[in-house]
Image (spheres, rainbow, N blue to C red):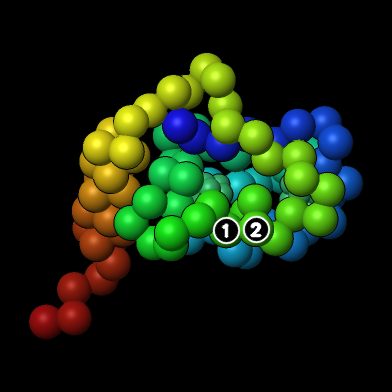
């Protein structure tokens, strides 16, 4: 499942730089998670880094984006390929 940020968010800014997938950004009122980019940190870490660091525990799973571990892994691989393609060739 992708995770989501609730309106309990206090906009403390600490989670955004922790996300390995650049899935977190400031929304209209508080921070938001892009479900197309959140892998629950699968592929990078054993635990969701934003949840680990959030001081108010306002990052539950997003019930609208229920995904298996395999689906999260496929999302990680897609993001990884996109990142590789976006990098300038070192040749
Ligand atoms: S769980 Fe990981 S990938 Fe998802 S938003 Fe949090 S830090 Fe980013
Ligand atoms: S760490 Fe938690 S409270 Fe801070 S900006 Fe992120 S979601 Fe909001």
For label 1, being within 8 Å of ligand 1 is answered: yes
Crowding at label 1, few (<14), some or many (≥20) Cα neighbours within 10 Å?
some
On residue 29, the disc is none
The image quadrant of residue 61 is top right
Q: What percent of the width, then of the height, locates residue 21?
A: 45, 54
Question: In the picture shown, does residue 52 fall above or below 26?
Answer: below
Question: In the picture shown, does residue 47 fall above or below 4?
Answer: below
Q: Residue at x 65, y 35 (%)?
A: 60
Q: What percent of the width, then of the height, locates residue 39?
A: 42, 44
Q: What is the secondary structure assignment of the residue under circle 2?
A: helix
Cα distance between the residues tagged 2 and 1: 5 Å
Q: What percent of the width, then of the height, locates residue 74?
A: 24, 41
Crowding at label 2, few (<14), some or many (≥20) Cα neighbours within 10 Å?
few
Q: Residue furthest top?
A: 64
Q: Residue at x 54, y 52 (%)?
A: 48
Q: Is residue 41 left or right of residue 63?
A: left
Q: What is the secondary structure assignment of the residue under circle 1?
A: helix
- Decide which of 86, 9 is in the foreground and name it: 9
Give the residue pinned by disc 1: 49
Q: Is residue 17 left or right of residue 39?
A: right
Classify the position of the C terminus by image quarter.
bottom left
Q: Residue furthest bottom?
A: 91
Q: Is residue 75 left or right of residue 53?
A: left
Residue 28 makes an appearance in the image:
no
- Decide which of 51, 38 is in the foreground and name it: 51
On residue 52, the disc is 2
Classify the position of the N terminus by image quarter.
top left
2 and 1 marks in contact (CB < 8 Å): yes
Q: What percent of the width, then of the height, locates residue 77?
A: 24, 49
């Amino acid at each position: 499942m992708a995770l989501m940020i609730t309106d309990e968010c206090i906009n403390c800014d600490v989670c955004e730089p922790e996300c390995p997938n650049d899935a977190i950004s400031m929304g209209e009122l508080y921070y938001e998670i892009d479900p197309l980019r959140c892998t629950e940190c699968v592929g990078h870490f054993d635990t969701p880094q934003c949840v680990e660091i959030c001081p108010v525990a306002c990052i539950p799973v997003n019930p609208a984006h229920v995904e298996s571990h395999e689906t999260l892994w496929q999302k990680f691989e897609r993001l990884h390929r996109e990142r590789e393609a976006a990098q300038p060739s070192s040749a």
